[in-house]
Amino acid sequence: MGENNQIIGEDDYILLKDFKVETEVDEEKGFILCFWVYIFNSNAFPSTILKQVYAETNSSPPLLVLDEKTLMIFPLTCLLNEALGSGNTDLPSEVPKVSAEIEHPQNNWIHVGYEVSSDFVRLYINGEIAGELHLSSLSNDNSMPNGSRKRTLIGITGDSNLQGFIHDAKVLLSTLSIKEQYVKDPPLRLSIDESSISDIEEDNGFWNIVGGKASCRRIFSLDVLLLNTFGQPVNKELEVVASLLYAHNWLPVEKTNDEEPPLLASCDGIEFASCDRPCKLSKGRASFKLKISKLSSKCDNRQFCIKFGVSKLEGYRFLEDFSPSI
């Protein structure tokens, strides 16, 4: 992670692997857990996002699981502990759960609400009820815990590929509105403004940009936006930097043979290495004029892409955006 500043507080955005909440809950009264989650780079499914931890039984059954485009949440019951058992990572189809289909579960912020009462559990996605499970169908003399039980909810990587962030996680009284929590503190994201693109030819999802030697390369321009997850501009004193990467592995493109930077930023007719010339955001917008000095034909015909990221905040993937392949 890059160095934090006052723009993003230390606890505003937490890596899944570092997320932990401990709370005493009274299941007779119920409670609500709600949070924003941003998942990226997940290739193995199903992947556990959050799990329950019962110290007295040394069991850690899953709480929230992503299976491709299906988000599943499980009830807090001893029946679930017995079904999965300590250390069991399988997800039998008979284990009761609430499921919701998510069209784009990765590289997007999703607000999850989990409401628990003595009678039911409910799953909310982006402020709306996505499903519920009545606990009466699960209960027997030993299945439901009595009184207060301490639970620890932690963010984990279900496997080595699962990565992500948690934002604005809260445990609340069940009398409060999840809809109000959904709109209260939306997270940030950085996005290319496609309507601002100029002098770039688009073909089947690819960008065609003339680069190479100085007499041939062409200036192209575009804007980058800092938005909240509802698409509203956010006014922050930040700088955005552009860099040229290889599209297949996102590694930086090397300098040319004459040590010229592969991506140039043009300002008042003067060219600078793009990494040395970040653009300041003004009312949530940064405007770029760029040139590419490197040719893909000089790089084994590998495709490029342009990465835009907030300076001094490396590692916050939601504050990065990537162009199509070039």
Image: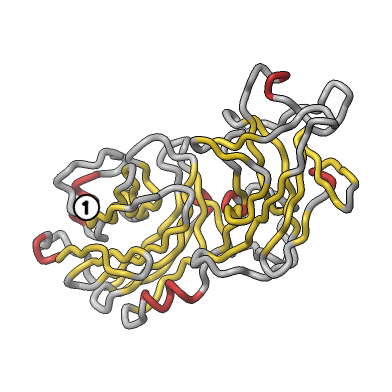
Q: In terms of depth relative to the viewer, which is nearer, 32 or 257?
A: 257
Does the image show residue 247?
yes
Please tell me which residue lies in front, 227 or 317.
227
* Residue 157 location, quadrant: top left
Q: Is disc 1 placed on a helix, strand or loop?
A: helix
* x then y, percent, for residue 246: 64, 30
Binning the other alpha carbons within 10 Å of mark 1 as few (below 14), some (14 to 19) or many (20 upward) gives: many
Near-viewer residue (103 or 70) = 103
Q: Residue at x 66, y 49 (%)?
A: 198
Residue at point 34%, 47% (across, down): 66
In the displayed structure, 257 sits above or below 158; it is above
The residue under label 1 is: 80
Give x and y (percent) for residue 80: 22, 52
Q: Quadrant of residue 33?
A: bottom left
Residue 130 vs 185, above or below: the answer is above
Residue 109 in percent (x, y) is at 47, 58
